[in-house]
Image (cartoon, grey):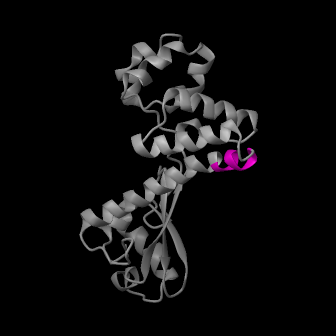
Amino acid sequence: MRTNPWLEKSKLNLIPLSLADEFIEALKEWTFTGEVQDYGDATEDCELCEHPELRYHFEIQNEIKKSSLWVGSSCILRFQEIGVFDEDGNRLIDKSSRSKELNRMLKKALEDKMLDPLRKLWKVRDRNDDERLFIERAVRNYKLQSGFTPIELLNIFKFLDSSNISYDPKNYKISLRSDDNKYSIYSMSNDDLQLIRPCFTNGQMKKHTALISKNS
């Protein structure tokens, strides 16, 4: 009978960190902690099944031995014995609800990673500084439209650069739903356009090539 190499690797990596010496029983000792890591590129291995080229890691912890593993979301979904709980502490059983919770926590982690430089920028500005007020308005707008306008991102990046606060522009979403947002790109210089260019998704790049590439 042909063995599953991913399953065998999972057994070898999990059982020594667990109290139980039988794989299914050992899995029951583990719970998703809610912690998620984004590495920006698909460079990491799953510490459970050793699957390569993962961009995101999800932490699971043994509730008895307090040992931890950083794994891919597919392993958590594949092994339903690994505990996943909602915001109210209810254990999620079906794959759909477990997947939704993992995606919710991933979205939260990505948003925190995006907002962290803005929090640093906000703190270094005076209470009545126009830039501080601009940041507050931009973040409110982001939460409403799930993205920043091109002008908001351009100013945010310039503020961050002037304050020597590091950031990754690929973490920031741009909203091009309104005509004002689309055509504001036309007023930008080539240097300004290149500053926000990493924020465009592949879909946005294809859909708005004429706008985005007009100065390239």
- Would residue 97 be found to the left or right of residue 85 on screen? left
Q: Is residue 125 visible?
A: yes
Instruction: Pick the residue in front: 131 or 27.
Output: 131
**Image side of residue 82 versus residue 174, left or right:** left
Picture layout, residue 174 above or below residue 127: above
Magenta stretch, overall SS: helix
Q: Is residue 66 left or right of residue 205?
A: right
Quadrant holding the N terminus:
bottom left
Magenta highlight range? 119-125
The residue under the point 71% across, 50% down is: 123
Q: Which residue is rendered at x = 43% and y = 68% of the image?
A: 9
Percent position of residue 175, x then y: 42, 32
Give the image quarter of residue 160.
top right
Where's residue 203, x and y in %?
A: 36, 29
Q: Residue at x 49, y 35 (%)?
A: 148
The answer to whether residue 5 is visible is no
Say above or below: 19 vs 162: below
Residue 190 at what x, y percent from top left? 59, 14
Compared to residue 67, the image places residue 168 above or below, namely above
In front here: 134 or 181?
Answer: 134
Taking the magenta stretch, the answer to whether it contains residue 120 is yes
- In the displayed structure image, the side of residue 71 where residue 157 appears, left or right: right
Residue at 42% x, 87% y: name it.
21
86 in the magenta segment: no
